[in-house]
Image (cartoon, rainbow, N blue to C red):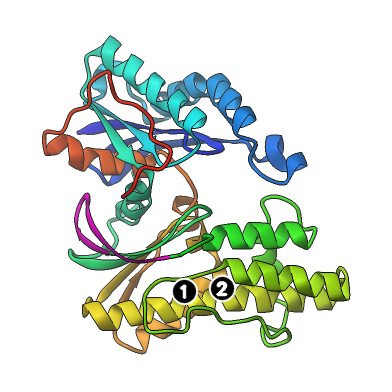
């Protein structure tokens, strides 16, 4: 089954064709980073307008790269939430129009479920790789969400822990903005931290209780307070500050993940979302879980950020189960998983 996926939840206009939920035939992403960079973050109205301009060319390019015609498609999957409602509506309306015109089955997909499907994807020329068995533990870390989940089956999840305030990815980006590192700044913090001392600055370690919930807003406050006291750092001091700030975020994610492993007894862990590309998190989780004999599944970095292949992959499972959306399908900004 060949499924066209469409993703427009934030600032990436994306389309992809995936076969049987795993084999990626094409994966096209039009980034808006340069559009939003002067503002230090995503401007929702600008994002929506850019999606309107890019959605048709991106879809056409996805079909072209897959070497397919409209008649070769078996279904359409589109992100229906969560995300910026104006941005979501562009993708949803495009998907409904295609489904109606081509008489193709349509399904709406939760963006977060898409991130958890990314680990199962492979490029058309890539050999099969080990994937998690069901059930397994999932850690989803992105700019908008930080969740611990029991992944029971495709499309079936049980939430066991979450941030009580900001997401880990938001902490990275807002921290980078305070440090004058530009947008998006999470990857800049990651790069500078590699030459810094993670013990140089004593950032707080929140939520050290035995629960699985997390908190990251206090780290931003601590960084702001330090900058007000010491001023903007330069060179090595900046690298040390980045390493220490990143270390506090990663330590909490790893600590809570290990606690979730102990509580659930699950022996496999997958990580998804934009922060899953962070080198310190990947290394720290690898070391921590291997010591316990846990199998870690990390998607390639290109599958961590928003893309439509993950939406098509997740949509495949809904389509084969007989789910169908009609033309009343709508976008939901705060759609729960």
Element class at badge 1: helix
Q: Which residue is mark 1?
A: 253
Query: Can you tell which mark lies on residue 249?
Result: 2
As displayed, is residue 16 above or below residue 268?
A: above
Magenta stretch: includes residue 151:
yes
Left or right: where 218 falls relative to 157: right
User: Is 224 situated left or right of 54 in this image?
Assistant: right
The front one of 211 and 184 is: 211
Mark linked to residue 274: none
Query: Magenta segment range?
Result: 150-162
Residue beneath the point at 34% across and 73% down: 296
Residue at left offset 28%, top offset 44%: 314
Q: Can you tell which quarter of the image residue 32 is in?
A: top right
Q: CA distance from mark 1 to mark 2?
A: 6 Å
Q: Are marks 1 and 2 in contact (CB under 8 Å)?
A: yes
Q: Is residue 268 above or below residue 104?
A: below
Q: Secondary structure at mark 2?
A: helix
Q: Residue at x 48, y 62 (%)?
A: 276
């Amino acid at each position: 089954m060949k499924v066209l996926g469409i993703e427009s939840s934030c600032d990436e206009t994306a389309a992809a064709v995936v076969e049987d939920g795993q084999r990626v035939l094409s994966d096209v992403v039009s980034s808006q980073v340069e559009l939003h960079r002067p503002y230090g973050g995503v401007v929702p109205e600008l994002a929506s307008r850019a999606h309107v301009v890019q959605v048709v060319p991106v879809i056409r390019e996805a079909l072209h790269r897959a070497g397919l015609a409209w008649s070769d498609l078996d279904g359409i999957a589109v992100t229906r939430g969560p995300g910026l409602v104006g941005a979501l509506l562009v993708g949803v309306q495009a998907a409904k129009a295609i489904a109606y015109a081509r008489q193709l089955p349509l399904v709406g997909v939760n963006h977060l479920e898409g991130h958890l499907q990314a680990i199962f994807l492979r490029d058309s020329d890539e050999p099969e790789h080990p994937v998690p068995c069901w059930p397994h533990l999932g850690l989803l870390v992105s700019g908008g969400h930080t969740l611990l989940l029991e992944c029971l089956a495709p499309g079936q999840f049980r939430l066991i822990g979450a941030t009580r305030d900001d997401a880990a990815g938001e902490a990275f980006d807002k921290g980078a903005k305070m440090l004058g590192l530009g947008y998006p700044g999470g990857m800049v913090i990651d790069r500078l931290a590699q030459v810094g001392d993670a013990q140089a600055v004593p950032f707080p370690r929140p939520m050290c209780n035995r629960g699985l919930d997390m908190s990251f807003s206090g780290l931003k406050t601590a960084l702001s307070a330090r900058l007000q006291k010491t001023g903007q750092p330069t060179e090595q001091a900046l690298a040390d500050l980045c390493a220490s700030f990143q270390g506090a975020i990663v330590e909490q994610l790893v600590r809570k993940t290990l606690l979730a492993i102990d509580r659930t007894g699950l022996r496999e862990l997958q990580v998804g979302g934009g922060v899953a590309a962070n080198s310190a998190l990947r290394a720290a989780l690898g070391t921590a879980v291997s010591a316990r004999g846990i199998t870690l599944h990390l998607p390639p970095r290109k599958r961590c950020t928003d893309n439509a292949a993950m939406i098509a992959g997740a949509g495949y499972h809904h389509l084969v189960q007989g789910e169908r959306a009609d033309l009343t399908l709508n976008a939901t900004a705060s759609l729960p998983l």
